[in-house]
Image (spheres, helix red, strand yellow):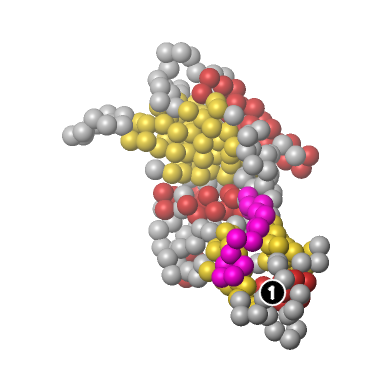
Amino acid sequence: MKQLFIIPRANGAYPTSTTLLKGQLMFYKSDAPNTVVSTAPAATDKEICFAYSRGEDSSLITGVIDLDSLTVIKMSKAGKATTPAYGKGKWVIVCPTPEKGLNYTITLAKKGVVFNERNLFSVTDTYRAKVKTAADLAKSLADQLNKLAPGLINIKATVTDTNNVTIQGQDYQDYKVVASDDLYGTTVTSTPAVAPMCDKDYVKNLASVCAQNRGFNNVYADGATIYPGYPMEVDADDYLIYNFHFANPRRASRTRDEAIWQDIYVAVPNAAPANTASTGTIVKIETIFASKLIK
């Protein structure tokens, strides 16, 4: 199971009572459902419960977290010190002086495509009246790249240092850039595209991945209009995301004994000046689950 709970900026404070505003999340013990937990569980506690308010007629999503198997991973836009810095891709191809009878090709292979989606894009040129120097070849290939596939690839190609084709990504889509045909063996300097984690687009995509486990099953075309609260509202630009990974054992009507692994994601607006209320939820999560937290 995967569930995503998004804490809105307006209601980012951690609740002090069991009367929850829309989007608020609280933790409580099963034997004390009317008391909000604000401190770390005792060493003898085996589980902790949660409740998330959807706001529609005070409806709640509730569940139980097994503490023995629990790990909590904290994700942020900055990532860890070892995480590659996010940025748009850049590729530089050095063009040689063209020779008669040879073809010079640059191929872009789009990464992360789905079945039947176009993934290869190529441009080529050869020695001719207007293409006699390395600079001519670079300009011709760059011009073709800029006209290649608007709407399918989002790049800008320029000529740098006279005979270098520089391809700059305009979004976070990554490509494998290959010098092919008689350009094969030419140096290609690559700076891969790395999409930022935990920004608005990241959370929207995570929401779509978790949609079915929230009961949003038929979201094609007009089907999405039958679900109140779909798509999930994402109203901040920067989030901290906590991944609760745990396995709840079977306790009733069981014919098998293996525990069922679950993932709960809690997206809390990062404590930027406009989101100061969310610091309450951030502090409480990190206090309650301090012994389980991996940063």
Q: Residue at x 42, y 13 (%)?
A: 44
Residue 272, quarter of the rendered image = top right
Specify the principal SS of the magenta part.
loop
In the image, residue 279 above or below residue 292: below
Residue 185, quarter of the rendered image = bottom right
Range covered by the magenta-colored residues: 180-194
Foreground: 131 or 227? 131
Q: What's the residue type where badge 1 is placed?
A: Pro
Name the residue at the bottom extreme: 129
Residue 261 belongs to the span the image colors magenta: no
- The residue beneath circle 1 is 98
Q: Residue at x 62, y 38 (%)?
A: 83
Element carrying mark 1: loop
Name the residue at the top extreme: 43
Say left or right for 222 vs 280: left
In the image, residue 197 above or below residue 292: below
Foreground: 217 or 161? 161
Q: Residue at x 39, y 43 (%)?
A: 1
Residue 63 in the image, given as x and y percentages of width and height: 42, 35
Name the residue at the front extreme: 100
